[in-house]
């Protein structure tokens, strides 16, 4: 198949098992057996038209070429994935529409106090993110919305959902954004994802997928009691505006809520509430003192 590549707007990757792919006649991936979970390879091809040959060895093998947008909506502005945002005096990167991740780890923490399987809803990390860390953002925390986060293992990351303001990145999100937002060779740190591993430890203990210092993922060797980095993710409320910044590290975007506030006034019978949306042209008279 002949496919146009546009590196300015999109990133591309192969997801495959028991298959191989060729770009312009040159084999770029080669899987000699089944991969569980499927293997992933980023497509490193220059912009322009390329001839892709996607071939399966048979026996249930498959290969898929996936395309991901490199731009997103941040408030009222279209920005590039990976550009910088300032929230709560902390530096963040854009992951998607109003979706951001902290650039730096917020310290190393254990997923749980024992190596038994513990749900995301009950992990101390989630509790800390949505209390101590959330409050550390100051008034900027009011710009964030409640989000329904999908939770599961690598075979089904949508087994259930959990609602909170702050969470961690999922395994599949990391794979989708690797080499776009995250350096393909890693940033030298280890940090948790929110995705469970289907692999259990020797004693039946639960394992969690983490990002290694070299940028690869590991779901085999990291039980809940290990101390790993915390990189929070969050979603802005809709309707915000980018007020300053150009998205660079030295001049990150800053968002604010410029919508007029809504107040409620109590009538003379002290019972009925009258919601009023204030604007620059609004006048209130006959205030009861």
Image: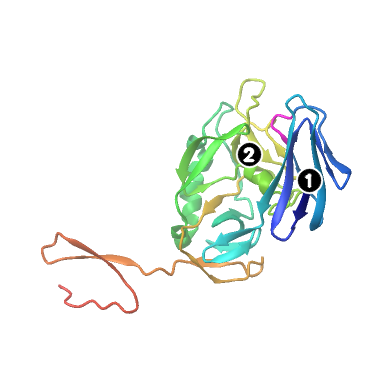
Question: Is 36 covered by the magenta stretch?
Answer: yes
Residue at position x 34%, y 78% from top? 280
Stretch of the chain drawn in magenta: 35-39
**N-terminal label among 1 and 2:** 1
Task: Measure the C-alpha gap from mark 1 to mark 2.
Answer: 47 Å
Is residue 28 among what the camera can see? yes
Question: Is 272 covered by the magenta stretch?
Answer: no
Residue wearing tag 2 = 227
Q: Are marks 1 and 2 in contact (CB under 8 Å)?
A: no
Which is closer to the viewer, label 1 or label 2? 1
Residue 200, position as x, y percentages in the image: 64, 24
Quadrant of residue 59 in the image?
Answer: top right
Residue 225, position as x, y percentages in the image: 60, 33
Characterize the magenta stretch by its predominant secondary structure: loop
Q: Badge 2: how crowded within 10 Å, few (<14), some, or many (20+)?
A: some
Outermost residue to the front: 1
Residue at position x 56%, y 26% from top? 116
Q: Badge 1: how crowded within 10 Å, few (<14), some, or many (20+)?
A: few
């Amino acid at each position: 198949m002949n496919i146009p590549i546009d590196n300015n707007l999109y990133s591309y990757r192969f997801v495959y098992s028991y298959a191989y792919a060729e770009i312009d006649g040159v084999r770029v991936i080669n899987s000699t057996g089944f991969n569980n979970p499927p293997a992933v390879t980023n497509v490193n091809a220059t912009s322009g038209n390329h001839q892709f040959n996607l071939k399966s060895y048979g026996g249930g093998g498959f290969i898929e070429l996936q395309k991901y947008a490199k731009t997103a909506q941040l408030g009222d502005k279209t920005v590039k994935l990976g550009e910088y945002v300032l929230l709560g005096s902390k530096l963040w990167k854009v992951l998607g529409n109003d979706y951001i991740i902290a650039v730096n780890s917020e310290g190393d923490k254990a997923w749980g106090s024992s190596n038994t399987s513990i749900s995301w809803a009950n992990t101390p990390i989630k509790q800390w993110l949505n209390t101590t860390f959330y409050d550390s953002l100051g008034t900027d925390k009011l710009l964030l919305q409640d989000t329904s986060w999908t939770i599961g293992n690598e075979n089904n990351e949508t087994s259930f959902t959990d609602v909170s303001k702050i969470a961690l990145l999922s395994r599949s999100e990391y794979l989708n954004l690797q080499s776009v937002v995250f350096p393909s060779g890693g940033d030298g740190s280890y940090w948790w994802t929110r995705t469970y591993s289907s692999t259990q430890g020797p004693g039946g203990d639960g394992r969690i997928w983490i990002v290694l210092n070299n940028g690869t993922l590991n779901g085999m060797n990291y039980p809940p009691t290990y101390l790993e980095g915390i990189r929070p993710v969050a979603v802005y409320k809709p309707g915000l505006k980018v007020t300053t910044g150009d998205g660079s590290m030295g001049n990150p975007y800053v968002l604010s809520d410029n919508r007029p506030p809504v107040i409620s006034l109590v009538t003379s019978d002290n019972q009925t509430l009258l919601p009023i949306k204030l604007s620059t042209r609004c006048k209130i008279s006959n205030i009861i003192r």
